[in-house]
Amino acid sequence: MKDRHQLRRRDFLATSAAAASIPYFIPEGVLAQDEKPGANDRLVVGHIGIGGMGNGHLGRMVKFQEMGLTSVAAVCDVDEGRLASAAKRAVGATPYRDYRYICQRKDIDAVVIATPDHWHAVQTVHACESGKHVYVEKPASVTVEEGQAMVTAARRNHRKVQVGAQGRTGWGAYYTCRAIRNGIVGKVSKVTCWHYANPVDNNPVADGDPPPQLDWDLWLGPLPWRPYNQRYLHGVFRWLLESGGGQIRDRGAHQFSTIMWCMNADHQVSYTVEATGTAPTMGLWDCPIDMNVVYNFTDPDWTLTWGQPGNKVGKSEFGNVFWGENGDHLVLEWEGAYRPAEPRAMEFKLPPGGEDPYRIDAYDDFNMNHAADWFKAIREPDYLPAVDIEIGHRIATLCNLGNISYRLGRKLQWDGVKQQVVGDDQANRLLGVPQRHPYHL
C-alpha cells in the first residue's frame, strides 16, 4: 500500500549520488521469508548508525552471529571512519553510507537503528515499510507526530519494533518492579527523579567546513539545513532541543520507561505536565541547564517529578525514588539496568497470589536480553517486545511534552487518547515540525 510515508524511487535516486554506492550480493540461501528469519533460522541484520551505542549493539550482534543466531549483513554510517572500523569488526558485512540501500535489500530481515534522535522516526518508518523489523535506540522520537507515524508503520506492516530502553530487561528494574507492584512500600503516591544538569556551550566555536570523512547533508537528514559546527556532533547533538532534547529525552526516556513499568501505568496515557527551567545564555546548545517537570496522573492518582538536579537520594549520578505510605520509600539507581536494586527489593518475597512481572532471562548481559526479547517477538506473532514501539512512543511523549511545557512556560493538559493538548492550539502546533526534503515522513 502506497502512502505519504513511502520512500519514492525518484527521491532515492536524486539524493543517492552523495552516498557510497557499493554493490552488494545476496548470499545463496539467506533470502528471508515474511515473518521468518533467513537460512538456518538466522536473523539477517543490518546496522544503521555505529557510533556509541550503535557500536555496542554491533558487538553484541557479532556475538549472536558467533552463536549462529544472526548474520550481520550490512553496516551503515555517515562517518567513513566509523564505517571502516565497523566493517572490520563485522567481517563480511557490506558497508554503506546511506541507510536506504539497506532498506532496499530483500535479504535483510531486521535493522538496528542507533543514529542521532532526529533520524529515528524516518528510518524506522522506512524500514518497516521495507518489510524489516526494527530495534531503535531511545528516545523513540523527537516529536509526538513522529512517534505516531512509527506506531502506524509498525502495525500496518506487521513489523516488531523494540525501543532500546533496556531497563525493562535489567535485573535492577525487575526486582524493583516486583517489590513495588506487590506493596513493599504500600500505595505509591509519587515518584521523583534526580539527574545532573545539562551542559553549557561556554566555549563557542565558529561554523566551518565539515571533516572530509563526514557526509554532513546525510547527518542533518530531516533537520533544517545549517552550516557545519563541531558543537552539533557527534554526541553533543544531545544538548539541542531540536535534535537531542537534553537529559530528559535521553536518560528521562530510560527512567520513565522503568517507572511506568514498575507502576503498572503503561495504560495511563493522559495527564498534566508543567515544566520550569533555566535557559542558557551563550553558545549553540539551548536545552535548559536545570529543569523541573511535574506530571500528574489520575485513576489511580500519583505524581511523577523529573528533577534536574532534583533531590539526590541515592549515591549514583541519577535515579528515582518510589514514595509510599507512612514515609516509606524505595530507591532505584540509574534506570535499573546498570545498577542493582536495593537489597530489600532483591530479598523481597513474593506473597501468595502476588504478581511476578515477566522478564526474559537468557543471558547475563541485559542488553543481550533486550535483543533476545526482540528476537522472541519477531518469531512469535502474538508476542510484543518489552518496549514495543507504542510503549516507546508514550514514553517519548512524556519527554517531549516536558520540553514543550518548558518552551511555552505553562502547564499543559494532555489527552493521550486523542493525542493532543487540551485547549492549546500553540502547544498542538509543536507536536510536529517540518522535515527537510527528501528525508521526511
Image (cartoon, grey):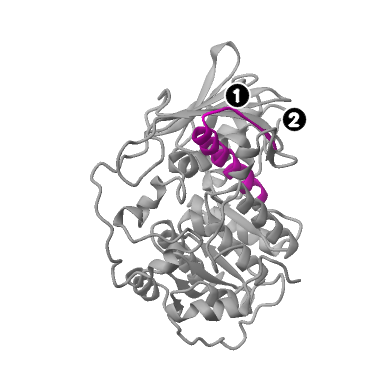
Q: Quadrant of the C terminus?
A: bottom right
Give yes or no for residue 136 being in the magenta stretch: no
Magenta residues, as a range?
Answer: 390-415
The crowding category of the residue bearing disc 2, from other C-alpha atoms within 10 Å (few below 14, some 14 to 19, many at least 20), is few
Please give left or right for residue 170 compared with residue 210 in the image: right
Q: Percent position (x, y) of residue 107?
A: 61, 79
Residue 69's image quarter?
A: bottom right
Marks 1 and 2, how far apart at CA: 28 Å
Q: Amino acid at mark 2?
A: Gly
- Residue identified by numbered label 1: 303
Give yes or no for residue 414 being in the magenta stretch: yes
Q: Main secondary structure of the magenta part?
A: helix
Please give left or right for residue 151 compared with residue 117 in the image: right
In the rendered structure, which disc, 1 or 2, sits on the residue that comes first in sequence?
1
Q: In the displayed structure, would residue 145 be above or below residue 17?
A: above
- Residue identified by numbered label 2: 353
Pick whichever, 366 or 270, lies toward us: 270
Q: Percent position (x, y) of residue 332?
A: 49, 31
Q: Percent position (x, y) of residue 439?
A: 54, 66
Pick whichever, 329 or 425, lies toward us: 425
